[in-house]
Image (cartoon, rainbow, N blue to C red):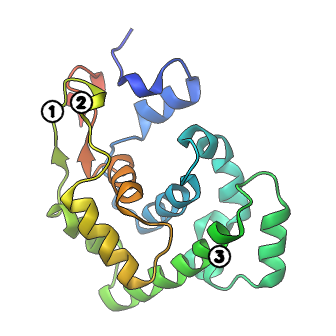
Amino acid sequence: MCQRCEWCGDSELYQKYHDEEWGVPVWDDRLLFEFLILEGAQAGLSWITILKKRENYRRLYDGFDPAKIAGYDAAKVAALLSDTGIVRNRLKVAASIGNAKAYLRIVEREGAFAPWLWQFVGGQPIQNAWAEFKEVPVSTPESDVMAKALKQEGFKFIGTTICYAFMQAVGMVNDHTADCFRYAEL
């Protein structure tokens, strides 16, 4: 059996996410947007809750198409808030629509979202070497700067802790513990 980061425990869903996605560098604009929306939805909840609802989010949020989400009207918001397949929080739903608009403004100005986000880590993953998961920080100076920049662009539900979790998820930092089989692979 492979040694994994302790956070994924015995959950098959967590293990699959850990083994296949967590920490893998993402350069796809749409997937980065998806992770930002999901990380915001996760605020105050466990990540496993969001993973269990991820396919519902993809379906209800039109495959995380920012242009479609930016155009959601009151009827669509009402439909989202009535669907138990996602986190039914009015502020988080409103934030996802506002975040789509902010995303589109960045893409319009910068040409793409990924390079703009990756600038906060110098364009390549930060390679950490933690012996134990309890050593992993919940935020860093890089996540502080990213959160501030995203807020200035109009993003909501995007504090430094959410940004750091996002950075871990999309491979901007390698926070697999050094004894984890994925650490050396990434």
- The answer for how far apart the CA atoms under marks 3 and 1 are is 38 Å
Numbered disc 2: secondary structure: helix
Is 43 situated above or below 9? below
147 left or right, relative to 177? right
Alpha-carbon span between mark 1 and mark 2:
8 Å
For mark 1, what is the residue? Answer: 129
Mark 1 residue type: Ala
- Indicate which disc residue 94 carries: 3
Indicate which disc, 2 or 3, sits on the residue closer to the N terminus: 3
Secondary structure under tag 3 reads helix
Query: For this rendering, which residue is in front, 129 or 20?
Result: 129
**What residue does disc 2 label?**
183
- Where does the image place residue 48, in percent across and percent down from the top left? 58, 37
Q: Callout 1: few (<14), some (14-19), or many (20+) C-alpha neighbours within 10 Å?
A: some
Q: CA distance from mark 2 to mark 3?
A: 37 Å
Callout 3, which amino acid?
A: Ala
